[in-house]
Image: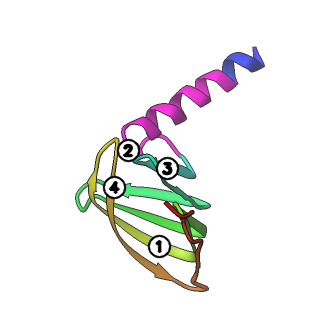
């Protein structure tokens, strides 16, 4: 019985991530955009009218090869496809950016 409940929750989370935008009716604290951008926070809410995700609490945005952390962020999705994502991000409170150089090509 417990495995069934876990699978149902996992399936809902996967459906949220595959579309590239969180479903407002499914609570989530992790979103994946394109092949290399992941956003996590204590609270993520998608506003479909502005196509903006409001992230609150322990925000972490991993956009390979960099990581951005902040207390809050508003992430406007300019364009999102399976292969790329264009985001306009406003970070607030205890902002930190870690830039990791890519390996030589």
Q: Are marks 4 and 1 in contact (CB under 8 Å)?
A: no
* Apparent side of residue 5 relative to residue 74 in the rendered image (left or right): right
Task: Verify CB contact (< 8 Å) between mark 4 and mark 2.
Answer: yes
Cα separation between marks 4 and 1:
17 Å
Regarding mark 4 in the picture, which secondary structure is present there?
strand
Quadrant in which residue 99 is drawn = bottom right
Answer with the quarter of the image where residue 87 lies.
Answer: bottom left
Foreground label between 4 and 1: 4
Q: Is residue 84 above or below residue 2?
A: below
Asked whether the residues under the numbered discs 3 and 1 touch, taking CB atoms below 8 Å apart as contact, a structural biologist would say no
| Residue 9 in magenta stretch | yes
Q: Which residue is mark 2?
A: 20
- Mark pair 3, 1: CA separation: 14 Å
Quarter of the image with the N terminus is top right
Nearer the camera: disc 4 or disc 2: 4
Query: Residue drawn at (61%, 69%), measured in percent from left and top?
Result: 57
Q: Residues within 10 Å of mark 1 (few under 14, many from 20)?
A: many
Q: In front of the other: label 3 or label 4?
A: 4
Q: Are marks 3 and 4 in contact (CB under 8 Å)?
A: no
Stretch in magenta: 6-27
- Badge 4 is on which residue? 85
Secondary element under disc 1, as helix, strand or loop, is: strand
Direction from residue 65 to residue 18 in the image, left or right:
left
Pointer 4 or 2: first along the chain: 2
Single out the residue that lies furthest toward the right. 2
- Which residue is disc 1 drawn over? 73
Dot placed on the residue nearer the N-terminal end, 3 or 4:
3
Question: Where is mark 3, residue-wise?
Answer: 31
Q: CA distance from mark 4 to mark 2?
A: 9 Å
């Amino acid at each position: 019985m417990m495995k069934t409940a876990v699978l149902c929750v996992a399936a809902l989370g996967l459906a949220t991530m595959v579309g590239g935008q969180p479903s407002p009716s499914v609570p989530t604290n992790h979103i994946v955009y394109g092949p290399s951008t992941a956003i996590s926070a204590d609270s993520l809410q998608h506003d479909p009218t502005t196509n903006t995700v409001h992230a609150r609490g322990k925000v972490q945005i991993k956009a390979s090869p960099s990581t951005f952390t902040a207390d809050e962020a508003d992430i406007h999705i300019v364009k999102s496809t399976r292969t790329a994502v264009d985001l306009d991000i406003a970070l607030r409170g205890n902002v930190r950016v870690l830039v990791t150089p890519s390996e030589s090509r």
